[in-house]
Image: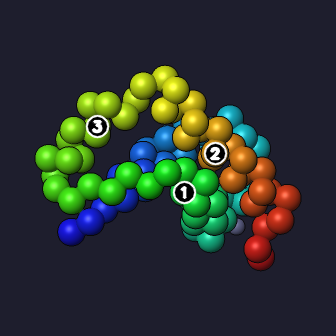
Protein backbone atom coordinates (compact mmCIF):
# COMPACT_ATOMS: atom_id res chain seq x y z
CA UNK A 1 0.00 0.00 0.00
CA UNK A 2 1.33 3.39 -0.98
CA UNK A 3 1.45 6.07 1.61
CA UNK A 4 2.42 9.71 1.32
CA UNK A 5 4.90 10.03 4.11
CA UNK A 6 4.64 13.80 3.95
CA UNK A 7 1.14 13.41 5.39
CA UNK A 8 2.58 11.82 8.51
CA UNK A 9 5.20 14.55 8.79
CA UNK A 10 2.60 17.34 8.48
CA UNK A 11 0.39 15.61 11.07
CA UNK A 12 3.40 15.41 13.33
CA UNK A 13 4.49 19.03 13.03
CA UNK A 14 1.08 20.75 12.74
CA UNK A 15 0.17 20.81 16.47
CA UNK A 16 3.38 22.57 17.47
CA UNK A 17 3.02 25.14 14.68
CA UNK A 18 -0.61 25.78 15.66
CA UNK A 19 0.51 26.64 19.18
CA UNK A 20 2.42 29.63 17.83
CA UNK A 21 -0.41 30.88 15.60
CA UNK A 22 -3.61 32.44 16.84
CA UNK A 23 -6.02 30.52 14.69
CA UNK A 24 -9.60 31.33 15.72
CA UNK A 25 -11.14 28.10 14.60
CA UNK A 26 -9.48 24.74 15.07
CA UNK A 27 -12.31 22.52 13.91
CA UNK A 28 -11.65 19.45 11.78
CA UNK A 29 -12.70 21.28 8.63
CA UNK A 30 -10.17 24.06 9.10
CA UNK A 31 -7.43 21.66 10.14
CA UNK A 32 -8.07 19.47 7.10
CA UNK A 33 -7.94 22.56 4.90
CA UNK A 34 -4.61 23.57 6.41
CA UNK A 35 -3.24 20.09 5.87
CA UNK A 36 -4.48 19.93 2.28
CA UNK A 37 -3.00 23.32 1.37
CA UNK A 38 0.34 22.52 3.00
CA UNK A 39 0.51 19.08 1.36
CA UNK A 40 -0.26 20.54 -2.06
CA UNK A 41 2.73 22.82 -1.69
CA UNK A 42 5.10 20.15 -0.44
CA UNK A 43 6.70 17.41 -2.48
CA UNK A 44 4.97 14.12 -1.76
CA UNK A 45 7.15 11.36 -0.37
CA UNK A 46 5.60 8.06 -1.27
CA UNK A 47 6.64 4.98 0.57
CA UNK A 48 5.46 1.45 -0.08
CA UNK A 49 6.74 -0.37 2.98
CA UNK A 50 7.11 0.00 6.72
CA UNK A 51 10.82 -0.20 6.08
CA UNK A 52 10.57 2.82 3.82
CA UNK A 53 8.78 4.74 6.56
CA UNK A 54 11.52 3.89 9.06
CA UNK A 55 14.17 4.90 6.59
CA UNK A 56 12.61 8.30 6.01
CA UNK A 57 12.02 8.78 9.74
CA UNK A 58 15.74 8.64 10.30
CA UNK A 59 16.26 11.29 7.68
CA UNK A 60 13.19 13.45 7.99
CA UNK A 61 14.27 15.98 10.51
CA UNK A 62 17.15 17.66 8.86
CA UNK A 63 16.77 21.31 9.75
CA UNK A 64 16.16 22.42 6.18
CA UNK A 65 13.46 19.82 5.68
CA UNK A 66 11.66 20.78 8.86
CA UNK A 67 11.94 24.48 8.06
CA UNK A 68 10.31 23.93 4.68
CA UNK A 69 7.43 21.95 6.16
CA UNK A 70 6.85 24.52 8.92
CA UNK A 71 6.94 27.32 6.35
CA UNK A 72 4.26 25.68 4.22
CA UNK A 73 2.09 24.97 7.26
CA UNK A 74 2.28 28.62 8.32
CA UNK A 75 1.33 29.76 4.80
CA UNK A 76 -1.62 27.34 4.89
CA UNK A 77 -2.74 28.58 8.33
CA UNK A 78 -2.69 32.18 7.09
CA UNK A 79 -4.77 31.24 4.04
CA UNK A 80 -7.39 29.47 6.11
CA UNK A 81 -7.43 32.31 8.62
CA UNK A 82 -8.09 34.86 5.87
CA UNK A 83 -10.64 32.77 4.04
CA UNK A 84 -12.27 30.23 6.33
CA UNK A 85 -14.61 28.02 4.37
CA UNK A 86 -17.43 28.16 6.85
ZN1 LIG B 1 -13.31 25.80 11.44
Tell me: 11 left or right of 85: left
| Residue in the picture at 50% in, 32% down | 66
Tell me: 59 left or right of 78: left
Disc 1 and disc 3: Cα gap in Å?
A: 18 Å
| Residue in the picture at 52% in, 26% down | 64
Residue 39: numbered disc: 1
Label 1: which secondary element: helix
Q: Residue furthest top?
A: 63
The picture quadrant where one finds residue 47 is: bottom left
The picture quadrant where one finds residue 41 is: bottom right
Check the picture and name the quadrant holding the C terminus: bottom right
| Residue 11 seen in render | no
| Neighbour tally class for label 3: few under 14, some 14-19, many 20 plus, Cα within 10 Å | few
Spot occupied by residue 15 in the image (x, y as percentages of width and height): 54, 44
**Mark 3 = which residue?**
57
Q: Is residue 30 above or below residue 16?
A: below
**Mark 2 = which residue?**
72
Amino acid sequence: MLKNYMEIVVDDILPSVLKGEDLDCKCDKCLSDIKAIALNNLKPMYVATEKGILYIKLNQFSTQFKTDVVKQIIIAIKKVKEEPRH
